Image (tube, rainbow, N blue to C red):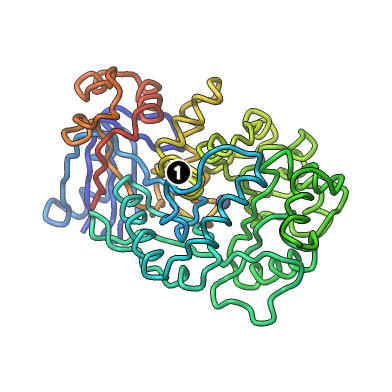
Amino acid sequence: MATLVRAPWLVPIVGPPVADGGVLLDDRGRILAAGPFSDVAAHPALRQWGRRASAWREVDGVLMPALVNAHTHLELAWLAGRVGPGGPMPAWIERLLFVRERHPVPDTVMRRAAERLLADLHGQGVAAVLDIGNRSAASALDPPPGPSGKRLYRLFLHELLGAEPPPTPPEAPVTAHAPYSCGPRLLTWAKKESQRQGVPFSIHLAESAEEVAFLRHGSGPFADFFRRRGLVPPSRPGQNPVAYLDRLGVLDASTVCVHVVHATSDDLALLARRGGKVVLCPGSNRFIGVGRPDVAGMLAAGLLPALGTDSPASNERISLWREMRLLAEDHPDLAPADILKMATLAGAETLALDGWGKIAAGATGPLIVVRPGGRQRKNKNTPAAFPQWDALRRAAGQEIEAFLVQHGEHCEVEWLL
Ligand SMILES: [Zn+2]
C-alpha cells in the first residue's frame, strides 16, 4: 500500500524547502515522488491504485530526512561531566585516561549509559551513528527501539592504537585512533582490514596544533606526553597529518577524517582529490579548545563535511541539533541549507547509507517531522525568542532552514511511519 503524506513544510535537503509539500511512499518506505503537494497528489500511481490501495497522512511540522551522527564514542557515555574542558589536547587526553584508569567501570555500567544515550539520540531524530570504541563489550551494544518502535542504525568500529597490528584481530571491523597514536604498520594494516570488510576507515585527524607539531617535528606537548607515560612514540613522519596518510596510501573515498581543524589549503585540496570524507565536531572542538576548522575552505575545495557529536567525555551535551547551532555560531557565513545537508546527506554518505539523508524519488532513508511544541516549549533551556509554529507556517523557505539550525534542539521530533 502506498502512503501519501502532506506537510506544511518539506525540507528535502537536495533542493530548497517546499511550502505545502507532499511525499508519496511505497509499502516499503521508498519515496516514489516528493514536491509540492498538488503535484505529488496527481502522481499517476495514485490514480492507478485507487483510493483503497493508499493511505493518507497529514503531519503538522517540517518534514525532513532523519539526522546522521557521523562520529561518537558511545562507550564513553558514562564519562559525561567527569572530564573537564580545556586543552591542550595531550593534557585533556591525560585527564581522560586518569579518570578511566583510576575509576574503571564494569561493562554493565558502560552499557547502560551507552544505551541511554542511544535512546536519547533516537528521540532527537538521529537515525544512524558511526560509533567508535575500543572495549570489546561496546561492539555488543544493542540500540533500543526508539519512540517509533524502530531501531537506530549503528555502525561500530573497533579502534586500535599502538605501533603494530594486534596478534588477534578484534571481532568487530577495525579502525585506527589517530596518526600520532598509531604506527605506520598498524595504520596500513587497519586500512586494508576495513577495505576487506567494506566499512569506512575512520580516524581522528589534524585535531590539534599539538598533533601537527608532533607529526612534523616530533616535539611539543605530545612528545612530552609519550615521555611521561614511558611510551615510544609510534610515528614521527615529518609531514602534516593529511599528507602523511596519503603517503601511507590510506587516504581514499572510504577514509573518514574526523575534526580536520588544522589543515592547510593544500591538505584540503589533497583530501578532496582523494575523495576523502570529513566529519566536524564543533562542540568537542570548543570543549577541548583546539580551534575552528576552515569550513569555507573545505566547501571551496569540494568537500561537504558531515557532523558528529564526539563523546560525552568531550562535549557538554550530545545533540546533533546543537552541533548545527554551534557550527553556525562559529561560521556565521555558512548557509543554513549547507549545515542541514551536513547533518543529514553528508552523514549518510559517510556511513555509505545509500538513499538516506534526502527526500527525493528513489530515497529510502527514515523521515522525521520537526516542530516547536508542548514539552520542549516549557524547557528551561529554551531561548526566550523561540519562534512559534504559527509564525513559521507563513515563513519563507530560508527562514525555515535557519530556524531548524538555530532552534532544532528545542523542537519536538516525531518519526514518520
Ligand atoms: Zn572522537
Residue at screen point 73% across, 51% down: 225
Q: Nearer the viewer, residue 40 or 417?
A: 417
Q: Which residue is mark 1?
A: 344
Q: Is mark 1 within 8 Å of ligand 1?
A: no
Residue at screen point 62% across, 31% down: 292
Q: Position of residue 104 (x, y in %)?
A: 48, 65
Q: How many marks?
A: 1
Q: Nearer the viewer, residue 279 or 415?
A: 279
Residue 346 in the image: above or below residue 99: above
Q: Nearer the viewer, residue 160 or 126?
A: 160
Residue at screen point 28% across, 44% down: 43
Q: Nearer the viewer, residue 381 or 98?
A: 98
Left or right: 223 with respect to 45? right
Q: Secondary structure at mark 1?
A: helix
Residue 295 in the image: above or below residue 25: above
**Residue, far bottom:** 168
Q: Quadrant of the N terminus?
A: bottom left
Left or right: 47 with respect to 263? left
Q: Position of residue 8 (x, y in %)?
A: 24, 30
The amino acid beneath tag 1 is Thr
**Residue, far left:** 52
Residue 401 in view (yes/no): yes
Residue 157 in the image: above or below residue 78: below
Residue at screen point 23% across, 40% down: 41
Residue 351 in the image: above or below residue 41: below
Residue 39 in view (yes/no): no
Q: Position of residue 317 (x, y in %)?
A: 41, 41
Q: Position of residue 128 (x, y in %)?
A: 42, 55
Q: Residues within 10 Å of mark 1 (few under 14, many from 20)?
A: many
Q: Which quadrant of the structure image shows residue 143?
A: bottom left
